[in-house]
Each structure stands twice: as structure tokens, then as C-alpha cells.
Image: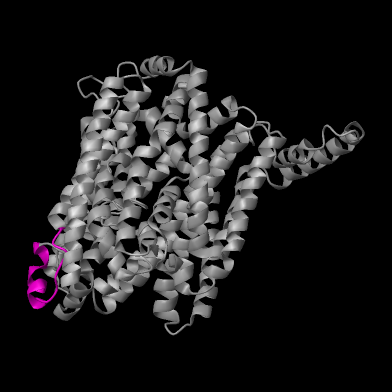
Amino acid sequence: MHLELIDWAIIAGYFVLSLGIGLWFKNKAGESFVEYFASGRSLPWWIAGTSMVATTFAADTPLAVTGLVAKNGLAGNWFWWAWAFGGMLTVFVFAKLWRRAEVITDVELIEQRYAGRPAAALRGFRAFYISVVMNSIVIGWVTKAMADVLKQTVLHDESLPRLFATMAWAGSATTPWAPAATAIHDTLRITVETWWQHAFPDYTDFWLVAAMLGATGVYSTLSGMWGVAITDVIQFLLAMVGCVALAVVAVAHVGGIDALHAGVDKAFAGQGDPLAFVPDFSVDNPVMGLGVFLVYVLTQWWATWYPGNEPGGGGYIVQRMASCKDEKHAVKATLLFQLAHYCLRPWPWILVAFAAVVLHPELRTAKDPGVGYPMLIRELAPIGLRGLLLVTFAAAFMSTISTQMNWGASYLVNDVYKRFVAPDADDRAMLRASRWASVLVLLLGGAVAFVLITRGVSVDDAWAFLAALGAGVGGVFLLRWFWWRINVWSEIVAMVGSLAVFLVVKLWQGALPEGERMATEYASLLVALVTLGLWLSATMLTQPEPRDHLVAFYRRIRPEGPGWGPIAAAAPEVRTDGALGRSLVCAVLGTATIFLTLPGIGALIFGDYGKGAGLLAGAAVTAGLMLGLHGLAARGASRAQDAR
């Protein structure tokens, strides 16, 4: 894909802006450890919420959505839509509890909730596991996705030296001395290109994306959470503009919405309506089986730990909530995230995915159908939009990488270095350790990316792998907020058991002929159910946490529900918000808002205006009820706080 001067100018301007923000916030990030990882707990809700959305809009996301759509139509997105109810529970039930905990990381809560050496060991191990293992996998697959984008666009039939030579020549090709310099220019380019192909065969995409990793590392290491959050806002806006522009171009190229609809119907012939929000199970070969759909809808939201969609809240979402000014800002930020995550972002990706299937029907059976998205950038984007779309993916990529760096480093410093190595370290030592930890996290992620790129792992396969790996642990993360009897061994057994059961199931399935293996979704359900049985058994067979420790946690966090009855009786002076029931109803209404808005927007796009208007009217009603009921709950909580 050839780039002109305007494309290079757009790309260069974006990188200059990102690095400039990093330098601007360097001094503020260096004021304290809390400033570096939690923005001094002073982020307004709209910045924190947009930062959450930007982080979950990574370079891999449009590719993964394209892969899901190519395989299973619109309904393929239930793989991630199914987390909506868990997300709304985080908004209305857990966000305020996390903010009260005043943690830097979610694993810091472990020693607030549990006592003794087992709790300390769990905190340290889980911090290491998430920051070094899980975080490296996430950075790896996001980097691999960015490499796929580059391979299908600027590096398609191009080498890195040729690309840079084109960039250098773009602004000078029309100058008076250009003809005289052409021979020298071409000779140097060919010499360097020949050397490069000999020295670095087949890895051009990795080295280019490694340079982007380095640029991201510079600004995120310098600026801490302030720089990460502010660049996230800018990056999200740029990314959305680019995705919408590509969707418009792709639909127009296919021949318009009606032609797109007809082409999609042809590509999925015999499998029901591929544009149906819920699959048509009455046909012989539906785009998605009923069992798979039920696994997604009924179990995924509570059973599976997944970065950005942790049951009970967790990960970098907690880090953003901890960075907010107060509980109200934390709740608003998380609500903004959930609504934008599910309602605002998906349709531009989905339209491009369907256009890719219409133009390239072979994607339906391809090993890595997600590459259809960047293929359309190469094939359809005009000059100027090419640069913007590359910036779109660079922004999505860098926002995620900067978050993963800062988040991963927060575990290593807060939960390993400060907790076990240097508990008396001052802010200066902590900040120095934070920056070194950020670099370490980036290098580990880069190493995993190299493996994924050279082995050709698809993005949607990486998504499915991580979801299966985290199956079974979600239940304990939810119930620890509602049931005093959950103890440290519940979490230890859930974490170790989930990994062990996952490996056993994977080995068992791998030994079977391919035609006899169960679907990945059923394997994840099996892992979740067995793990659930293991940790519930461990809970009842081991001693509860010390009563004094539980009472201290109850006084600090003020969790609600009958599961805290014995502890509440030991602390009669504690007044909870008294809003759990209304908060749960708000979560249901919020989920209904999402599941009415998504198909409503789709109906309007495809010309079914009556259906679209009806669905969006229903969404407006549920949203109004949700906000009104939340207002009542918030006022009740304020009165309870005044009484305290």
C-alpha cells in the first residue's frame, strides 16, 4: 500500500503528539508513587471512563471481531457481548466498593479481605502471574495484531527499507533536483534492502512494530497514569473517526447497504439470517449452535476472568476506578465505559467485517479471517485516509500497550517490590522501580509477540485461549464481596484448579481425533464447572478467615447482603448503603439498555426504521429507569453516610 506525503504527515504528527504528552506529564508523574500509578486519585470520570474504553479498543479488537463475524455472523459477537451483565454489576455494585478500598491494584485487596501468610503469598504470586504471564500474553497478541495490520497494509509486497525510502522521497520527488538524485537514491535503497533481507528475513513486520513499542514505552514510562489516560482520550477519538470512515468507504464500495445485506445473505446461505442479533436456531445449520449461545449468555459473565471483563471488577478497570476523584466519579466512569464499549464502538467494525466477507468469501474458512479488516484498508482506503487508518490502529495499539505497561508494572512494584522486597522504600525509590518495571513488562511482552508473530497464531484464537485459561475463577471473585465464608484457600484453589483443569482438558482434547473434540466453549464450561466444585469444596473444608480481620474489612468496605450476617452482627455500628437490591435492578436495566441499543442501531443502519426506532425507544426507557433508580440509591447512600 503506497503512502503519500499527506499520509506520512498524519502519521508523524500523531507520534509527535503522543511523545509530547509524555514529556508534558513527566514531572507530574514523578511527584509520587500514587501519582505515577493512580493519577493522585484525581481523575475526572469522563477521562477515566474514556481511558477504559480506549484500552479495550486495541489493535487486535477489529481483527478479532472480523474473525468472529466471518465465522458466525453478527451473533459471533456474543463471545464478548455476554460479559455485559457482569460489566453492569461492576458499575452499580462493585465500583464504589473498589474505590473505598483505595488500592493501587486489585490484588492488593487480597490482604484486606484475607489474613496471614497464605494471603500474602497469594497476593505476591497473583501479582507475578498477572504481570509477567497474563500481561505478556496480552501485549504479545496485541502486538501480533498490529503486525498483521502492517503486513496487510504498508508492508504488503514491501520491505522496511523500501518503505522508509518511500517516506524519505515523498517530500522531495517533485523538487528540481529530483531527477538527478533518482539514480543515487535507487542504488542506496536497493543496497540497504538487499542487506536487510539477508540480515532479517521474514521479520520486517516485527521490527516495525517493535519501533512502535519503543515509542509507546518512552511516553508511558515517563508520564505514568496521567499521560496514559490523557493520550487514551485522544487516541480513542482518532481511532473512532478512522473506523467510521473505513466503514463508510467499505459499504460504499460493496454497493451500499442493500447490496451489503444481499452479499452477506449469499455468503451465509443455509445458515439463517447472519444479521440476526440472536441466531436462528430453527435452520439445520445455524451460524451458532444453541448450546454455544447458551454457554456464552448464561455462564461467561460470571465464570470467566478476562482482562477488562473481570467478574466483580479487576485489572486495569480497578486501576482507573482507583484513580478517580471519589466513589461517584468511579461509578460514572465505569458506566461510561460499559455503554461506549458495547453500544458505541461495535457497528463500524461489524460493517467492515461483513464487507470483507462479501468481497473475500474465502475468509469464512480461512485460518485467520481477522486479516480481512486490514486487507480492506489496503484495497479501499484513498490517499489521506490511509494515513488516518494507520494512525487509528497505532492509536488503538499504543493506548492498550501503555495501559498494560503501567498496569503490569503496578503489580511488580506495589505487590512484589514494596510488599516483600523494600517495604520502607521512599517515593523516589518507588518511582525508580516503577520505571524499570515498566521497561521489563514491555520487553517481556515484546518477546511473547515475537513468538506469536513467527508462529502465526490468530488473534481470535488468542482471545479464546485466554478466556479458557481464566474459566472457573470468576465465581470466587464475585462471591468474596457477598459471602463472609469465602477464604484465601477459595481463591488459591480456584486459581490453581482452573489452570490444572484447563491443562488436563486441553491434553485430553488434543489426544482425540479432530472430529471428536468438543467445541472450545464447551471445554471452557467444563473447566468452569469443575473449578467451581473444587473451590467451593475447599471453602467448606478449610477454616474461615479470623473474625477480627473480617470485621475490619466490613467496617472499611461496608459490603451488603445476607452473606455478611454474622460479621454485621459483630459490627452493629456499621451502616451500609442499603442499596444492594436497587443496584442489582440497575445492573439488569443497564444490560437491557445495551441489548436494545445494539440491534436498534443495526436495524437503523440496514433500513428497518420502525424496528430500530422501537428498540431505541425501549433502550431510552430502560436507561431512564436505570438512572432514576440509581439516583434514588445514591441519595440513600448519602443519607447513610451522613448518619455515620
Residue 616 screen position, x and y as percent: 27, 31
Residue 353 screen position, x and y as percent: 44, 29
In this rendering, is residue 351 above or below 139? above
In the rendered view, does 110 fall on the left or right side of 263? left
Asked if one can make out residue 170 in the rendered structure from this viewpoint, the answer is yes
Q: Which residues are magenta?
A: 562-579
Residue 539 screen position, x and y as percent: 15, 66
Who is closer to the viewer here, 488 or 626? 626
Who is closer to the viewer here, 61 or 461? 61
Who is closer to the viewer here, 615 or 296? 615
Give the residue at the far bottom of this rendering.
424
Residue 13 belongs to the span the image colors magenta: no
Residue 571 belongs to the span the image colors magenta: yes
- Report how many numbered discs are placed on residues in the image: 0
Please state, as top left, top right, bottom left or bottom right, where the N terminus lies in the image: top right
Quadrant position of residue 186: top right
In this rendering, is residue 291 above or below 116? above
Residue 298 screen position, x and y as percent: 19, 42
Q: Which color scheme did the rendering employ for the protein?
A: one colour
Q: Residue at x 58, y 66 (%)?
A: 26
Asked if one can make out residue 481 in the rendered structure from this viewpoint, the answer is no
In the rendered view, does 373 fall on the left or right side of 565? right
In this rendering, is residue 308 above or below 23? above
Please state, as top left, top right, bottom left or bottom right, where the C terminus lies in the image: bottom left
In the rendered view, does 172 fall on the left or right side of 390? right
Quadrant position of residue 322: bottom left
In the rendered view, does 577 fall on the left or right side of 193? left
Quadrant position of residue 123: bottom left
Q: Residue at x 57, y 70 (%)?
A: 27
